Amino acid sequence: MSGPPSPTIVAIGGPGSDEENRALADYALGLTANDRPTVCFLPTAVGDADAAIVSFYERFSGRAAAWHAPIFPWPPADLRERLLGSDLVWVSGGNTANMLALWRVHGIDEMLREAWARGIALAGSSAGMICWFEAGVTDSFGPELAGMRDGLAMLPGSACPHYDGEELRRPTYRRLVGEGFPGGYAADDCVALRFSGLDLAEAVSARRGAAAYRVDSSGESQLEVRLLTRS
């Protein structure tokens, strides 16, 4: 018999086209043990915006038992029970710092740690990428990019999304790491980094030519990226 699922995090550098987003969603769904998995959406980083919630249901409905967990005016009373009964938790992009603060106020950070330990897959792009790390490059504090050292620290080091999608991401991350910011991983839009426990298991992409990198004080090294096939 196989053992319990490994703790899994899918950290995505950023979204792409509808077709590319669907390929990334299919990849995350394929990491679950169920043919019709239950997927929880946390739209906290965008303030539970209707457009983000609708987009989530359009992407996952018909292939999963999809539901979302609003945090305004307060989280559902049965959030822990329902979240831990899910197969996949998907985190939206948006303001990472605000999201983390609200999660901590309501204990959602601890629910996510418990879910991760149980083998429930955790995934997301942009804010949903960097939140799992100790640190990340973010525009949470204003229009200028800055280093944030207040992540959930489920994964060691740092992360930078949108490495090819925003022209200042790459030089900012390289500068921060050169100045002593924790090294880590960078991902172009449409690239997903899958971690099994604390280890990078693979990098995949829904877009040909998109890349991922390991970044430290000596520079960056490009990672092998597997192109996802589209059904």
Image: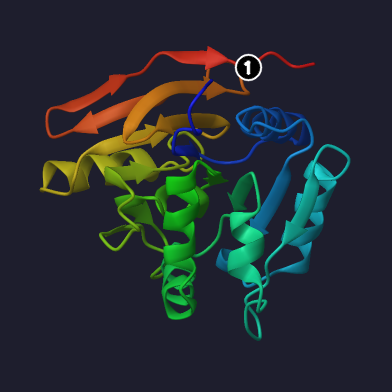
| Disc 1 target residue | 228
Q: Is residue 217 found left or right of 7 in the rendered image?
A: left
Mark 1: secondary structure: loop
Residue 208 in sight from this viewpoint = yes
Compared to residue 56, the image places residue 4 above or below, namely above
Compared to residue 217, the image places residue 138 above or below, namely below
Compared to residue 164, the image places residue 39 above or below, namely below
Compared to residue 51, the image places residue 192 above or below, namely above
Q: Nearer the viewer, residue 32 or 226?
A: 32
What residue lies at 63% left-to-right and 77% top-to-bottom?
75
Task: Say few, some or many: other residues with alpha carbon within 10 Å of mark 1 (under 14 / 14 to 19 / 20 or more).
Answer: some
What residue lies at 73% left-to-right and 40% top-to-bottom?
37
Q: Nearer the viewer, residue 193 or 143?
A: 193
Instruction: Quarter of the image for the C terminus: give it.
Output: top right
Residue 210 in sight from this viewpoint = no
Question: Residue 87, how many percent across, how many down?
Answer: 64, 44
Question: Residue 23, how many percent across, how many down?
Answer: 70, 27
What residue lies at 44% left-to-right and 21% top-to-bottom?
202
Which colour assignment does the render follow? rainbow
Q: Is residue 127 found left or right of 61 in the rendered image?
A: left
Report the residue that reaches farthest toward the right: 62
Q: Quadrant of residue 43?
A: bottom right
Q: Is residue 19 found left or right of 226 in the rendered image?
A: right
Circle 1: residue type: Leu
